[in-house]
Image (cartoon, helix red, strand yellow):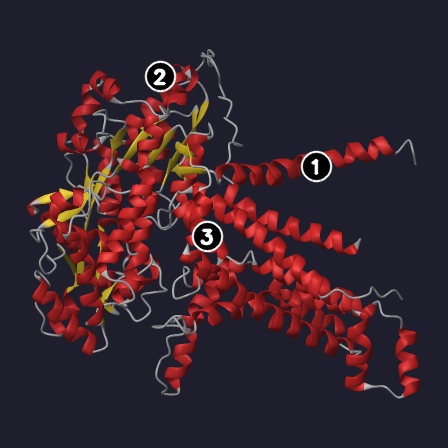
């Protein structure tokens, strides 16, 4: 008897761990719309004649935690609630540092628990819920409000288009990624900025001999390393093709280049086990001379490092098809308006008004000033560090601004590319094998 | 009693309902999903046994299984072992028993994530506590989480975290042993170490078995320490992190579910095996 109960108990224990894996079921319940039909609100409020029926709007974004624009975003929301006291805003955030927020967004969108406004990626990441009709195209609303539409720079709206040609997300700020360099460390060691591969490898050799980490990147969360290496190896055309229609032989050169850098001692000794925040930490603390990051990271570095930093495009790897002046960036995310909210007469007007407020030139300016992103509106962003201005200049001079490679392949393929970094640089796998394995995953995914 | 039956049934219902919603439904949903190829949340296609075929040729999964077994070995030897030694010692003192019980139990109530973050700061190569200590003795820095050491380094907090839990189970079991056994032993001249090995441990053998089963099933759940310390790199991938990576990071819920099913089957088999191995007559006082 005891044995059966123990067996039962162990089965229970094991089952309990499944919970973590299966949280994404269809167990979510849709929020009943508070407020309901257009209730005549108290008539004794003449000065608030334009206010909406009482309602709560849930806005999901990544402007939380340690995000540089967290406070700016909250203040933009506060402006709206101050002007419209009937509307309550639930500012729902999750850090973008890990992949958890993708799961959260997809679970919400799939289980009838859509936020009223969602700040999320544009492109392949959003394809699932866009194709499922969970969000409304904004084209009509944009055309119906010239003031709002003209607030955006045309390029930003163009880049916000989904594959079907519709705009589903109103852009806020764009981003760029690049090779951030601590000029002070370079000067102290008599090095030139790493504008081509030779200068980069010379810098790596010199710095690693002196015990300074040349290029701080992690192997597991190697998103930016892979994105830059593949873009510079395959060029814009080769990178944009992805892997579905065969392997571009130039992709392998990305991995060969990473191995070359590793053999020269470019990466932190513990690159295999640190995560992005720790690798950013090494750069921020001045222990590393370079890092590969995006514009959003600038705000998080300590002042000394930020003031001494500049940013250059990642140089072309040996034999690569890139021009050395193509950068990764774009208007990769924006605000989506959920279909359920749009169809709910009690919420629609308030949600649309909030959407317009969040993406008005004034709000865009505020957020861009805080996170150093490129504004989606034609506004002057002031008070930025020199490195952010360098970044804008780099983006303005670039031959092409290309979306990162993880938007060109499936999530699992990108996971596979990431997992190959360590084995390749340590010589346990050849670059050819790495790309072939990724190709296989990509094919399996499209079956 | 008979009239109470329907009330008992009534009161059992909520628990059954909660278990169904949060345990059995997800379990069967996993089973269902394991026959599908999924890409994200909106796209799934029936693929028959393809995920299971992949399961048996997946080298990474094999490695993750071996790493899990290695941690299991450390857990059984050190976690259960240390807990037993501590329990025997505390059982033999008369003063400060409660104090030690609290002290040893305390790590159990700290969340694994918090402990992992502490150990991240111990092990870090550039500004970790351990390397700073070494530096102050002019010894060269050590890469604590390299391919050779990483799994052992991850096992240390894993073992340490739960020693207190098993310690409390052991000490409770020991306190249930009737005093006359010891008195009889004393008359026979059996004391000290002999008393422990001949009397105390055999008498709590059934609890040792429970603890070992708990340790085995507990190891199947190891996730937080590995995830935070090494991200599964350098030969530390365990079943929990591998499943999470496949399901959540790669958004391949089909294969992730298949790995989860594998974990259940593997875990149940291990637990059965352990029970068979430890089979012994029950002792009643």
Looking at the image, can residue A68 be seen? no
* Nearer-the-camera pick, B50 or A374: B50
Q: Position of residue A88 (x, y in %)?
A: 44, 29
- Chain letter belonging to callout 3: B
- C-alpha separation, residue under disc 3 versus residue under disc 1: 35 Å
Give the structural element (helix, strand or loop) at label 2.
Answer: loop
- Which residue is the site of mark 3? B56
B14 shown above or below B81: above
* Nearer-the-camera pick, A7 or A148: A7
Q: Position of residue B44 (x, y in %)?
A: 41, 33
Give the structural element (helix, strand or loop) at label 1.
Answer: helix
Residue depth check, mark 2 versus mark 3: number of the one nearer the observer: 3
Neighbour class for label 3 at 10 Å: few (<14), some, many (≥20)? few
B52 shown above or below A79: below
- Chain letter belonging to callout 1: B
Direction from residue B162 to residue B113 in the image, left or right = left
* Nearer-the-camera pick, A427 or A350: A427
Instruction: Identify the residue at horizontal 22%, vertical 68% (top origin).
Output: A262
Residue depth check, mark 2 versus mark 1: number of the one nearer the observer: 1
- Chain letter belonging to callout 2: A
Q: Are marks 3 and 1 on the same chain?
A: yes
Give the structural element (helix, strand or loop) at label 3.
Answer: helix
Neighbour class for label 2 at 10 Å: few (<14), some, many (≥20)? few
Direction from residue B32 to residue B81 in the image, left or right = right
Q: Position of residue B259 (x, y in %)?
A: 49, 49
Residue A50, numbered label: 2
- Which residue is the site of mark 1? B16
**Mark 2–mark 1 CB contact (< 8 Å):** no
- C-alpha separation, residue under disc 2 versus residue under disc 1: 51 Å
Residue A151, numbered label: none
| Quarter of the rendering occupied by the C terminus of chain A | top left
Direction from residue A410 to residue A401 in the image, left or right = left
């Amino acid at each position: 008897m005891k044995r059966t109960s123990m067996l039962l108990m162990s089965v229970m224990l094991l089952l309990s761990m499944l919970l973590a894996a299966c949280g994404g079921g269809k167990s979510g319940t849709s929020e009943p719309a508070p407020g309901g039909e257009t209730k005549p609100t108290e008539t004794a409020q003449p000065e608030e004649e334009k206010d909406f029926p009482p309602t709560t709007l849930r806005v999901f974004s990544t402007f939380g935690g340690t995000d540089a624009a967290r406070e700016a975003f909250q203040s933009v929301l506060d402006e709206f609630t101050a002007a419209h006291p009937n509307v309550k805003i639930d500012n729902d955030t999750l850090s973008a540092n890990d992949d958890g927020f993708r799961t959260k967004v997809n679970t919400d969108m799939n289980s009838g628990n859509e936020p009223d406004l969602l700040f999320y990626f544009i492109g392949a990441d959003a394809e699932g819920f866009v194709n499922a009709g969970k969000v409304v195209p904004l084209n009509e609303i944009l055309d119906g409000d010239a003031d709002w539409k003209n607030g955006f720079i045309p390029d930003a709206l163009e880049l916000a288009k989904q594959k079907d040609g519709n705009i589903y997300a109103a852009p806020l700020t764009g981003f760029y990624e690049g090779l951030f360099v601590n000029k002070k460390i370079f000067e102290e060691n008599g090095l030139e900025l790493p504008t081509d591969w030779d200068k980069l490898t010379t810098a790596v050799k010199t710095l690693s001999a002196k015990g300074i980490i040349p290029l701080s990147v992690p192997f597991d969360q190697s998103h930016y390393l892979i994105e830059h290496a593949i873009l510079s190896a395959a060029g814009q055309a080769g990178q944009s093709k992805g892997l579905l229609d065969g392997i571009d032989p130039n992709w392998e050169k990305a991995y060969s280049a990473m191995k070359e850098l590793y053999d020269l001692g470019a990466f932190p000794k513990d690159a295999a086990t640190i995560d992005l925040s720790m690798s950013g930490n090494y750069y921020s603390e001045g222990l590393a001379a370079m890092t590969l990051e995006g514009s959003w990271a600038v705000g998080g570095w300590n002042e000394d490092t930020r003031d001494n930093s500049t940013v250059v495009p990642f140089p072309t790897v040996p034999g690569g098809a890139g021009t050395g002046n193509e950068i990764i960036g774009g208007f990769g995310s924006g605000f989506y308006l959920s279909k359920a909210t749009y169809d709910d007469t009690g919420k629609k007007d308030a949600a649309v008004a909030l959407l317009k407020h969040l993406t008005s030139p004034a709000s865009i300016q505020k957020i861009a000033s805080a996170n150093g992103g490129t504004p989606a509106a034609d506004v002057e962003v002031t008070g930025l560090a020199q490195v952010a201005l360098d970044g804008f200049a780099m983006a303005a001079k670039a031959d092409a601004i290309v979306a990162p490679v993880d938007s060109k392949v499936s999530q699992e393929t990108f996971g596979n590319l990431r997992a190959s970094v360590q084995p390749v640089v340590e010589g346990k796998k050849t670059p050819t094998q790495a790309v072939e394995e990724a190709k296989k995953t990509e094919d399996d995914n499209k079956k | 009693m008979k009239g109470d039956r329907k009330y008992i049934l009534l009161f059992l219902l909520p628990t059954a309902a909660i278990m169904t919603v949060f345990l059995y439904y997800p379990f069967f949903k996993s089973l269902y999903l394991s026959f599908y190829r999924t890409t994200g949340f909106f796209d799934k296609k029936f693929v028959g046994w393809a995920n299971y075929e992949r399961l048996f040729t997946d080298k990474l999964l094999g490695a993750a299984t071996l790493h899990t077994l290695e941690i299991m070995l450390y857990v059984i030897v050190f976690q259960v072992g240390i807990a037993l030694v501590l329990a025997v010692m505390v059982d033999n003192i008369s003063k400060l028993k409660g104090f030690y019980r609290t002290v040893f139990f305390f790590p159990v109530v700290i969340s694994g994530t918090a402990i992992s973050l502490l150990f991240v700061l111990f092990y870090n190569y550039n500004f970790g506590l351990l390397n700073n200590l070494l530096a102050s003795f002019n010894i060269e820095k050590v890469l604590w989480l390299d391919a050779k050491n990483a799994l052992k380094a991850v096992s240390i907090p894993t073992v340490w975290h739960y020693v207190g839990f098993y310690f409390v189970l052991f000490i409770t079991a020991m306190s249930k042993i009737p005093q006359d056994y010891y008195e009889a032993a004393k008359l026979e001249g059996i004391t000290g170490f002999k008393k422990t090995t001949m009397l105390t441990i055999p008498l709590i053998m059934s609890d040792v078995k429970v603890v070992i089963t708990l340790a085995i099933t507990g190891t199947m759940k190891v996730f937080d320490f590995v995830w935070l310390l090494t991200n599964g790199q350098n030969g530390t991938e365990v079943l929990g992190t591998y499943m999470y990576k496949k399901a959540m990071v790669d958004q391949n819920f089909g294969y992730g579910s298949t790995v989860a099913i594998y974990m259940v089957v593997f875990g149940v088999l291990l637990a059965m095996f352990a029970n068979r191995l430890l089979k012994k007559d029950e002792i009643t006082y």
